[in-house]
Amino acid sequence: MKPQKDYIILLHGFLRTSASMKKLEKHLSKKGYKVINLNYPSKKHNIADLSQNFLAQAIKKNCTDKSKRIHFVTHSMGGILVRYFLAKNKLKNLGRIVMLAPPNKGSKLADILSKSKLTKRILGPALKELKTDNKSLIQSLPPANYELGIIAGKFDAKVPPKNSKLKGMKDFLTIPCTHAFIMNKPKTITATKDFIETGKF
């Protein structure tokens, strides 16, 4: 039996569940990684609470072997949770991070939906934190000071490639797809594994 590789934490996007990351989970698990596919209630809490009460607790519970690195693979808002967590916490065994279609400069869809009081109430407090304006939470987060690779969808209307980029990222890749299913594309899965292992796509 081969020794297990590092930890990889998967974080789904806004209004999604861990089921959306299942294909990635299966592939990375087969490669020998200890994969934690975290499910979190994206509509019920703001980004700070989600980061501290769900992500931080998942790391504490599941990543107990300090000799192994902790990598992250995120979709959409999941990337913002990781950015917030790393801005507030230090991980001595932090590995590499792959973000899929992250709204690092905000989402135009969040701008539109936030205009309705009813929609804001239904979709929860994190929605307004994903807006593109200068007052949104996203704009207050620091640039990347860790090994970060970003994969964007060429046809993504929710988070166009230019909105997914982040200062300090190590590599950037666009693939021909839209926002919702970028995590299931074979090219995404291969590129994600490559970045985790080599630091480049």
Image: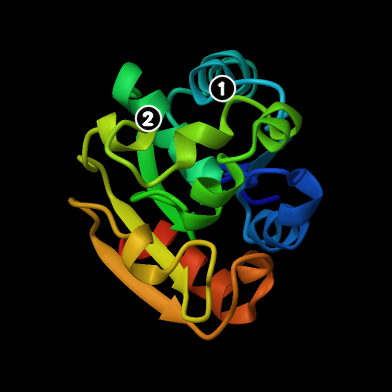
Q: Give whichever of 160, 131 is nearer the camera.
A: 131
Mark 1, Cα crowd under 10 Å, few <14 / some 14-19 / many 20+, is some
Q: Which residue is mark 2?
A: 137
Numbered circle sitting on residue 60: none
Residue at far bottom of view: 176
Q: Report which residue position mark 1 lands on.
A: 46
Q: Quadrant of residue 78?
A: top right
**Residue 82: x %, y % from top left:** 45, 35
Q: Residue at x 37, y 33 (%)?
A: 136
What is the secondary structure assignment of the residue under circle 1? loop
The residue lying at 37 percent from left, 30 percent from top is: 137
Q: Is residue 75 above or below residue 58?
A: below
Q: Position of residue 41 (x, y in %)?
A: 73, 28
In this rendering, the answer to whether 65 lies above or below 26 is above
Residue 70 appears in the rendering: no
Q: Is residue 78 visible?
A: yes
* Label 1–label 2 contact, CB within 8 A: yes
Instruction: Report the side of 76 relative to 197 (left or right).
Output: right
- Horizontal and vertical percent for residue 65? 52, 23
Percent from the top left, x then y, of residue 28? 64, 58
Q: Callout 2: helix, strand or loop?
A: helix
Numbered-mark total: 2
- What is the spatial separation of the Cα atoms under label 1 and label 2, in whole angstroms? 10 Å
Asked if residue 79 lies left or right of residue 139, the reply is right
| Quadrant, the C terminus | bottom left
Q: Which residue type does callout 1 highlight?
A: Asn
Against 13, residue 150 (above or below) is below
Instruction: Name which of mark 1 and mark 2 comes first in the sequence.
Output: 1
Q: Residue at x 25, y 42 (%)?
A: 146
Answer with the quarter of the image where residue 14 lies. top right
Task: Tell me if mark 2 has few (under 14), some (14-19) or many (20+) residues whose alpha carbon lies within 10 angstroms of its own.
Answer: many
